[in-house]
Image (spheres, grey):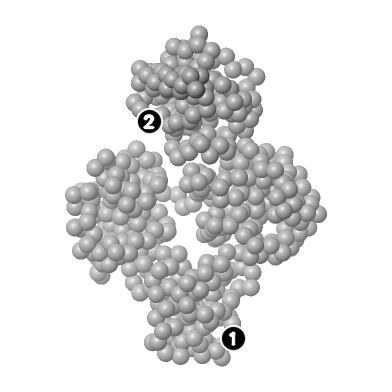
């Protein structure tokens, strides 16, 4: 599941063309970013009320781009009152792997905000250029909720393009206020929180309320919504559900990007309609899609409208073509996909109804079946996985790879040598599958990185290969598993 989400988010980050990071030369020799490792991490963090830690890998291009911006921000923040400390950990170093696992580092760079001596950990969700890092961390290191004392304060605080939450209270004490502040502390890296004694300072909503009430301002749908249940869990659910548009717009407008990320991070099934939003006649399509979103609100489906121009990476990820738009895709959390190409406005409601009733078969992305497959290492695609691997009756070593993966490129000639070794043995097949271009629907194959290699014995046993990546070790593994299968078959015959 993580592979599905991470790949999807990765293409989104690229597609959205988030803030570019430029490397600047610096004449300063002093480093302001503190280098931590397994030996000094706990001792250093335990002494800090607030510290930011970047987990990086030396080979990571994004990490290299971030480095000068992170250093520049660290220099500026070292002069803040009080100073804000930025640190880094080489998560690729073997001795630091336990730290990376503890802090759930699943990609590079990963930035974490650690508070209260490391007792509270939050994801860094701010910009990646120096000035943005500085402003974001100044806010994060200050109070979780801002005191709004005038209409001018409210005007400056409530950004028309962001989610902003304001608590209105008759006094800044009591259980409701304490619960609100606990929520603000918990969600401060995701939202901006404020509190006030007078609702008349606020730009929208009933001005005569004395509270306690929570008012959430948003740049879509009904623009604001009030909530009066001060149970912390109920408050959190209210904020999370209210901060996702009924229909999220996926286009090239940067102000929409936070809502797109929230959409993809949500636990809901994701219904995505891709169309050329500049075409004439698209209004009826958008209107029908919104009607369906209203109909299924609260029923486990989120809705997104994607503009064709901004959705090229999505098309590549799903393996679909521009000629298929207007196109609707539903993506479930287990990775299953459902697709309806070239649809018209009146197709949307009945198709979604059929999906909800289980009448729509899943869509499996597959490369075309090769016309010729004569190389020593055979090419497997999603549409041939059953015939060539699962039902072949052969001993199959299958590599799941990514074309851009350096480790895969190093393994390729070794697998070719193994394949040549078994060229005259019809019972053994050495094969490869491009895991970026084909869906892997069989739960026996848990592909979390590249390359991932599995062996499927002639009798159907599937096991991961985790040995050394040498010709001799791979052949030895195949032979041992063949012998095991032959031994089990002999025992069956005796019985």
Q: Which residue is pictured at 25% across the width and 69% down the height?
A: 82
Q: Is residue 447 left or right of residue 122?
A: right
Query: Is mark 2 in CB contact (under 8 Å) with mark 1?
Result: no
Image-quadrant location for residue 84: bottom left
Q: Residues within 10 Å of mark 1 (few under 14, many from 20)?
A: few
Is the residue 308 above or below the residue 43 in the image? above
Q: Which residue is mark 1?
A: 206
Q: Which residue is pictured at 44% across the width and 81% down the height?
A: 195
Q: Residues within 10 Å of mark 2 (few under 14, many from 20)?
A: few
Seen as rendered, the residue at the extreme front is 495
Q: Which residue is pictured at 56% across the width and 91% down the height?
A: 208
Q: CA distance from mark 2 to mark 1?
A: 63 Å
Foreground residue, 399 or 205? 399
Q: Which residue is mark 2?
A: 466
Seen as rendered, the residue at the extreme top is 424
**Residue 14 in view (yes/no):** no
**Residue 408 in view (yes/no):** yes
**Which mark lies nearer to you, 2 or 1?**
2
Q: Which residue is pictured at 63% across the width and 45% down the height?
A: 337
Foreground residue, 52 or 116? 116
Foreground residue, 57 or 340? 340
Q: Is residue 169 left or right of residue 144?
A: right
Q: Is residue 281 left or right of residue 407?
A: right
Q: Give the tally of numbered discs.
A: 2
What is the x, y in percent for residue 79? 25, 64
């Amino acid at each position: 599941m993580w592979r599905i989400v991470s790949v999807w988010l990765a293409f989104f980050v690229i597609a959205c063309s988030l803030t570019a990071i430029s490397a600047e030369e610096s004449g300063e020799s002093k480093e302001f970013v503190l280098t931590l490792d397994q030996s000094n991490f706990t001792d250093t963090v335990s002494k800090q009320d607030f510290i930011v830690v970047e987990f990086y890998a030396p080979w990571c291009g994004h990490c290299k781009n971030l480095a000068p911006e992170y250093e520049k921000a660290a220099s500026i923040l070292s002069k803040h009152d009080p100073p804000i400390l930025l640190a880094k950990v080489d998560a690729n170093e073997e001795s630091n792997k336990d730290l990376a696992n503890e802090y759930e580092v699943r990609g590079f760079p990963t930035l974490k905000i650690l508070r209260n001596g490391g007792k509270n950990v939050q994801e860094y969700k701010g910009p990646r250029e120096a000035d943005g890092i500085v402003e974001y961390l100044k806010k994060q290191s200050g109070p979780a909720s801002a005191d709004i004392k005038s209409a001018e304060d409210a005007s400056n605080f409530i950004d028309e393009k962001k989610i902003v939450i304001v608590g209105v209270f008759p006094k800044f004490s009591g259980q409701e206020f304490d619960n609100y502040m606990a929520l603000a502390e918990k969600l401060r890296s995701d939202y901006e929180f404020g509190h006030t004694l007078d609702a008349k300072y606020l730009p929208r909503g009933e001005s005569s309320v004395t509270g306690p009430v929570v008012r959430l301002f948003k740049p879509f749908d009904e623009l604001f919504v009030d909530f009066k249940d001060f149970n912390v869990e109920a408050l959190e659910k209210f904020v999370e559900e209210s901060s996702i548009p009924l229909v999220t717009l996926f286009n090239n407008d940067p102000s929409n990007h936070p809502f797109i990320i929230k959409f993809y991070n949500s636990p809901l099934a994701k219904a995505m309609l891709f169309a050329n939003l500049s075409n004439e006649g698209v209004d009826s399509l958008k209107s029908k899609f919104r009607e369906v979103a209203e109909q299924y609100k609260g029923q486990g489906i989120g809705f997104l409208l994607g503009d064709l121009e901004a959705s090229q990476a999505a098309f590549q990820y799903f393996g679909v073509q521009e000629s298929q738009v207007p196109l609707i895709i539903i993506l479930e959390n287990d990775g299953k996909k459902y697709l309806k190409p070239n649809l018209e406005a009146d197709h949307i409601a009945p198709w979604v109804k059929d999906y909800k009733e289980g009448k729509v078969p899943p869509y499996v992305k597959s490369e075309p079946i090769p016309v010729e497959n004569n190389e020593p290492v055979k090419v497997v695609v999603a549409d041939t996985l059953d015939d060539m691997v699962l039902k072949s009756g052969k001993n199959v070593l299958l590599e799941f790879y990514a074309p851009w993966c350096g480790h895969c490129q190093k393994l390729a000639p070794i697998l070719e040598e193994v394949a040549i070794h078994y060229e005259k043995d019809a019972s053994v097949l050495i094969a490869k599958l491009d895991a970026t271009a084909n869906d892997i629907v069989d739960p026996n194959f848990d592909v979390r990185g590249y390359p991932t290699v599995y062996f499927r014995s002639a009798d159907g046993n599937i096991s991961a290969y985790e040995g050394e990546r040498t010709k001799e070790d791979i052949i030895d593994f195949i032979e041992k598993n063949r012998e095991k299968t032959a031994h089990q078959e002999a025992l069956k015959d005796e019985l």
